[in-house]
Image: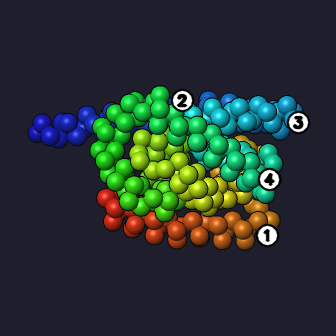
Amino acid sequence: MRRTARQAASLLALLGTLAALGALTAPLSELLIGSIDWIRASGPRGLLVFVALYAGATWLMLPASWSQMASGFLLGPLLGFASAMTLSTGFGLISFLLARTWLRSWVAQRLARRGWLSTLDEAVVSGGLSMVILLRISPLAPYNTMSYALGVTGVPTRSYLLGSAIGGALPMTLYTLLGASAPDLAAVLSGEAEPPGPLQWIGLSVTVLATLAVTARVRQVLRSRGLNPG
């Protein structure tokens, strides 16, 4: 009986949390859409603001997909991908270095609470560059959160940078293509974007299929290492 009551209480708490997150996410999405629309209309000055927003989203561990889609929306598929790769890798490196120095104790404590720290450290130390690549492709943890998590492991900085660039390329391609294919960002974030053209459909289809195939393989490898991506 007590167990049932605890489960019911946990379910209610989860529903309450989801409702609160939904209430907070809606105005945040509207603010993001308004900001990106202003940036697009403001030329070079707007792009500087976009870089600042990209940095803030990275360091505050907001979803990287938003920033990457916005990059494709603002700059097109090729330049959008190049800017997303540069900004995500560069600002992510700062997160990594902060976790390795000033924020090390704070990040380590939170990973230890989840039982991740020793397993993650062992996996990246033994797997090196290849494990960082797999973690960047995998949905094990959000991209921006993983930048901090990897900072408290023994992975070398060079392996972190190369692994982040190589492993992050596939999801970044998908998100920047999605952003570039939409006439307005609100449609992208709401899932109501107009259908892309034939060439864009081909690019999106190939990227989605590749992402699904690679992610399935990555899940198998990570489970074999003791990391459960869910």
Instruction: Identify the residue at horizontal 74%, vertical 53% (top origin).
Output: 82
The reply, left or right, for residue 157 in relation to residue 153 is right
Label 1 – label 2 distance at C-alpha: 37 Å
Looking at the rendered image, the disc whose residue lies closer to the viewer, 3 or 2, is 3
Q: Would you name the residue on which mark 4 appears? A: 79
Q: Would you name the residue on which mark 2 appears? A: 24
Q: What residue type is labelled 3?
A: Gly
Element type where label 3 sits in the image: helix
Q: What residue type is labelled 1?
A: Leu
The reply, left or right, for residue 3 in relation to residue 21 is left
| Residue 216 image position (x, y, % from top left) | 46, 68
Element type where label 4 sits in the image: helix
Label 1 – label 4 distance at C-alpha: 17 Å
Q: Which amino acid does label 4 sit on?
A: Leu
Q: What residue type is labelled 2?
A: Leu
Element type where label 2 sits in the image: helix
Instruction: Identify the residue at horizontal 47%, vertical 37% (top origin).
Output: 100
Of the two numbered discs 1 and 2 on the same chain, state the one appearing first in sequence: 2
Q: Quadrant of residue 152?
A: top left
Looking at the rendered image, the disc whose residue lies closer to the viewer, 4 or 2, is 4
| Residue 37 image position (x, y, % from top left) | 79, 36
Nearer to me, 122 or 109: 122
Q: Would you name the residue on which mark 3 appears? A: 43
Q: Would you name the residue on which mark 1 appears? A: 199
Looking at the rendered image, the disc whose residue lies closer to the viewer, 1 or 2, is 1
Q: Quadrant of residue 197?
A: bottom right
Label 3 – label 4 distance at C-alpha: 15 Å
Is residue 188 among what the camera can see? no
Instruction: Identify the residue at horizontal 63%, vertical 47% (top origin).
Output: 89
Label 1 – label 3 distance at C-alpha: 28 Å
Nearer to me, 157 or 224: 157
